[in-house]
Image (spheres, rainbow, N blue to C red):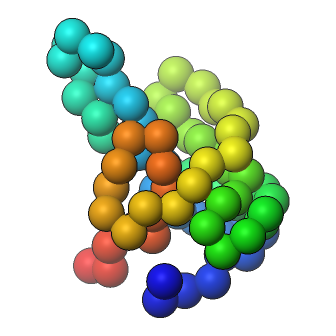
Amino acid sequence: MEQKPSVGRVVHYQAYGTPGGEFKSVPRAAIITEVISDEEIGVCVLNPQGIFFNKVKYSAEPKAGCWNWPPRV
């Protein structure tokens, strides 16, 4: 992992989408609220319809239900 997670940083949470494919898996902005380890964090996910809190594992590539660092642009 190229960076270390810390409280207050912004990451991407990869939403699951729907089983039938009506809604695709997409990245959502999330704020780190807790660092459990380098591989697992607590996040506040910012969705267009509201927010939710969850503990999630790291994935280097976008993977549903996991967090990753946003790409540099």
* Residue at 41%, 36% in the rendered image: 15
Residue at 64% x, 31% y is 51
Front-most of residues 58 and 53: 58
Q: Residue at x 33, y 25 (%)?
A: 17
Q: Classify the position of the C terminus by image quarter.
A: bottom left
In the foreground, 55 or 30? 55
Which quadrant would residue 46 be assigned to in this image? top right
The answer to whether residue 28 is above or below residue 57 is above
Residue at image location 31% in from the left, 17% down from the top:
18
In-image side of 48 versus 32 (left or right): left
Compared with residue 62, is residue 8 higher up or lower down, i.e. above or below?
A: below
Looking at the rendering, which quadrant does residue 23 occupy? Answer: top left
- Picture layout, residue 10 above or below residue 57: below
Q: Is residue 54 left or right of residue 46?
A: right
Residue 52 in percent (x, y) is at 67, 31
Instruction: Judge from the rendering whether residue 46 lies leftward or rightward of residue 24; answer left or right.
Output: right
> What is the number of callouts on the image?
0
Farthest-out residue, left: 21
Q: Position of residue 4 (x, y in %)?
A: 63, 83
Up-down relation of residue 4 to residue 26 (above or below): below
Residue 14 x/y as whole percent: 41, 45
Q: Nearer the viewer, residue 40 or 27?
A: 40
Left or right: 14 in relation to 53: left
